[in-house]
Image (cartoon, grey):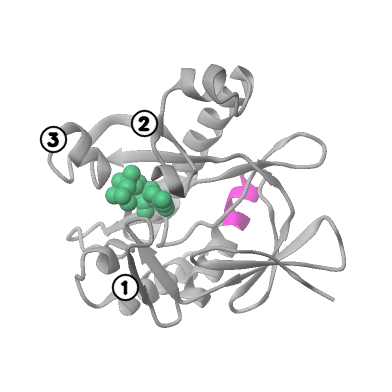
Amino acid sequence: MTEKLYEGKAKILYTSDDPHIVLAQFKDDATAFNAQKQGTIADKGTVNATVSAHLFTLLEKSGISTHFIDQPAATQLRLQKLRMIPLEVVVRNVVAGSLVKRTGLSNGTVLAEPIVEFYYKDDALGDPLLNDSHILSVLELVSASQLSELRASALEVNGILSQFYVDCGIRLIDFKLEYGFAPDGSIVLGDELSPDNCRLWTLSDNRVLDKDRFRFDMGEVASAYQEVLRRVLAHS
Ligand code: UDP
């Protein structure tokens, strides 16, 4: 018997017969702006599960430890159960989204080098940006060496995914990762890798292929998600 462990905005997590394995059911539901905007994107569950499965497989081949096990159905992933770290680890190659608001730089400005930011995963607080002192000595979320490991891993993931997406004709503008602890205490990449939590622009003409189409009512949302899936499958 499986039971619902947790229901989030875009996924439901179920237990499995194995206490170390959970089943993620990807939904077509979409939310933005801390759930103030709600809707659905046709077949988003299938796109996000399938793109995530491919990207986790790619990362594993490059030596990154992830929670991905397999994809038993179109909208489902079997995953190693982790004790999640309440941080959103954001990597940026190009200025977009909240970095435009924070800096006043133009959307699309290419950064001199990739940067990593940490946000506190707390809906009630609106996921605020944290600095190292907040993470280490105020909230004590991880140790200093674990924080270094998270930064290094996020940048390594960025290198692998950026190259893969270039091969797909896509620029990886920014993305969000979440990590957790495996039972042996090692840090493992969790969550999903999909157009819901990445900004993806076409290389040829900076056409937006990600959730910003939903956030900002740009139209052709479902077809943009399908285009990402098509391009990823063509280059896997
Ligand atoms: N992101 C996410 N979940 C969040 C916040 C951000 O997946 O709760 C992703 C977002 O899709 C983008 C990157 O992290 O690819 C950076 O987002 P940003 O800080 O610019 O925030 P936003 O503009 O999405 O509010």
Residue depth check, mark 1 versus mark 3: number of the one nearer the observer: 3
Secondary-structure class at tag 2:
strand
User: Residues in magenta?
Assistant: 56-64
Q: Secondary structure at mark 1?
A: helix
What residue is shown with label 2? 115
Counting residues from the N terminus, which is met first, the one under dot 1 or under dot 3? Answer: 3
Find out whether residue 132 is within the magenta segment: no
- Label 2, ligand 1: CB separation under 8 Å: no
Q: Which residue is mark 3?
A: 104
Report which residue position mark 1 lands on. Answer: 224
Q: Earlier in the sequence, mark 2 or mark 1?
A: 2
Q: Residue furthest bottom?
A: 42
**Alpha carbon separation for disc pair 2 and 3:** 17 Å
Where residue 66 appears, as percent x and y from the top left, is 66, 48
- Mark 2 against mark 3, which lies toward the viewer? 3
Inspect the magenta stretch and tell me whether residue 60 lies in it: yes
Amino acid type at mark 3? Gly
**Disc 3 beta carbon < 8 A from ligand 1?**
no
Disc 3: CA contacts within 10 A as few (<14), some (14-19) or many (>=20) = few
Judge from the rendering whether residue 53 lies leftward or rightward of residue 163; answer left or right: right
